[in-house]
Image (spheres, coloured by chain):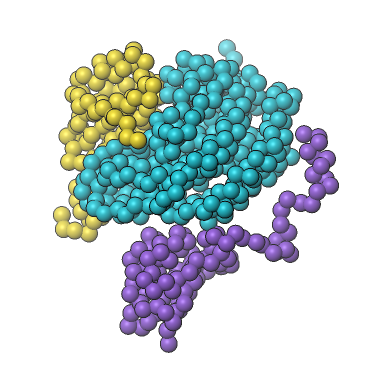
Amino acid sequence: MAETQKLINIEIKDLLEKVGEFHSSGYRLAQIGCSKTDALEINYSFDKDYSFVNLRIVISSIDIEIPSVSHIYWSAFLYENEISDLYGIKIKNMAIDYKGNFYRTTVKFPFNPPKDTQAAERGIAP
Amino acid sequence: MIKRTIIPFGPQHPVLPEPIHLDLVLEDEIVVEAVPSIGFIHRGLEKLVEKKDFIDFVYVAERICGICSFIHGLTYCMAVEEIMKIKVPERAEYLRTIWSELSRLHSHLLWMGLMADSFGFESLFMHTWRMREKILDIIEDTTGGRVIFASAKVGGVRRDIDNAALKIIWTNLESYRKELKEITDVFIKDSSVQHRLAGVGVLKKEDAYELGAVGPTLRASGWARDTRKLGYAAYKNIDIEPVTETAGDSYARCVVRIKELFQSIDIIRQAVAKIPYGPVEIRVTGVPDGEYFARAEQPRGEVIYYAKANGTRFLQRLRVRTPTFANIPSLVKMLPGSSLADVPVLVLTIDPCISCAER
Amino acid sequence: MAKTVIKSLFKKPATVKYPFGPKILPKGARGSISIDIAKCIFCGMCQRKCPTAALIVNKEEKTWNIARLRCITCGYCVEICPKKCLQMNNQYTEPMLTRREDLYKNA
């Protein structure tokens, strides 16, 4: 039942080139997601004929800017606005830029709170 | 130079089941541009996974959406089972398939009723929902709840359906098929329905693939892509052909969903015929450590669950990419060129489930 | 469509005339939780398993408290109870105007 899913780690500077390669070979963009461990990992998932490939870039803090892929895949603007609203990642040249108003939450960047509030949430000493 | 006006559509609108906002730029009643705006029912469920035990989280995952709730729970369980390398017993796989297809029947019937309501055909709406009640009765008999099934769990399913109940499902669905054909014939052949749906909101074949559309929205434009062919649950033992149409307009999307209704009835009857005897669950011990992307076919398209675990009882990250989120760009590209009166019909043809789209 | 509409003029309505007619629920419906308090040993397993924290069990005072509006009738407590004193009934709790909590005491 498990399909084989490939994961390729790349650098930020290769991102646009690799995504362009996938686009010209006929892959469709399945999702862009972000997860937070010690650093921030951003996954770009592509699918073609039921095979699943992921590209992953790792950035150490939200001050690093990432180029947007929405000029290659137009539908990426939704995913990029979502991760920039929830995590505070700066992405430049999005096709439609909501400038932080995509999800209007009371707390800015709710999934990536600064370190002292995280400790207070968990009830442990910072 | 024709003057442009901006009309806000939503978030409250009689035709929408859930709130979504579109800013429509109009030139004399023809839509020129549309800008979507979502986020009205963002509940932050992905953050809740850090606080709830990974076994208890099935309840939260089921409640992401009311219409596709079982398949959300199922995909979450599949993601965790794959990380922990648990093999679910055969009978549980078949039961999960039967409930998924019942879920699909119920969702498509709900959508058809809302579609009839959106162009004012109230009596057809009521008859379609009367047919849906019979499916909800089967679901309530077998799982205990009409909409939230509480049947999926990590390691199998929580309830069994005994052979007498399976036989009743088999015979009831055969007579159900005839009654359903009467109602779906109205959608396919009636001239007032055709007038509102044919030729409206055309999505060309290349555009549908480029914009990342999934589900019936993609299949109505000619691509035969159905995530059930991956072979999760019991689909590897059941033959499925994706249902396609080529026109790419709202009528084609309606016809694809109607054909999928009859396909689901066939799949349930095949699964009931092939279901083996055996246990329905397997004991789960230990904690997950690893990551995996689980994919399944919801009534609206392909859903992707990304789960990342780090060896504690709480998952580190759960990311849900729901099919409506992937269909919103196609909606935005379909709208220019249509008239203002067609906008509610177009918004409904992608089958928006906004509570899924913003969890 | 005309045939369906005319046929439905002569059939009885598809809905149940509730509350004037009885509401018949299937046997396995998950309606509400009830307890046989004489058998309960107040071990607290149901409180630990409840995903919504709807149950409060007090061993010294011998009370079992359920917050009706927090209960999602999932049935975890029924499965886990070692003495099998919890039961899932198929009647739903009636509508209420305040957040009612039901307290059962083994006097």
Q: Count the marks: how many?
A: 0
Is residue A94 visible from the viewing direction of this image? Answer: no
Left or right of residue A69: residue B269: right
Residue C38's spot in the image, x, y percent?
Answer: 44, 82
Residue B120 in percent (x, y) is at 71, 35
Is B25 placed left or right of B54 in the picture? Answer: right
For the residue pair C82 and B270, the one nearer the viewer reads as B270
A56 on left or right of B136: left
Q: Quadrant of residue C25?
A: bottom right
The relative height of residue A19 versus residue B50 in the rendered view (above or below) is above
Q: Can I make out residue C107 in this image?
A: yes
Q: Nearer the viewer, residue A66 or B96?
A: B96
Palette colour of chain A: yellow
Q: Residue at x 68, y 27 (%)?
A: B188
Residue sitting at 42 percent across and 33 percent down? Answer: B236
Q: Residue furthest front?
A: B277
Q: Nearer the viewer, residue B313 or B22?
A: B313
Q: Quadrant of the N terminus of chain B?
A: top right
**Residue at x-position 54% and y-position 22%:** B244
The shade of chain C is purple
- Of the 4 image quadrants, the one containing the C terminus of chain B is top left
Q: Is residue C80 above or below residue C65?
A: above
Give the letter of the cyan chain: B
Residue A89 locus on image (x, y percent): 26, 33
Q: Residue furthest bottom?
A: C107
Q: Position of residue B108 (x, y in %)?
A: 58, 37
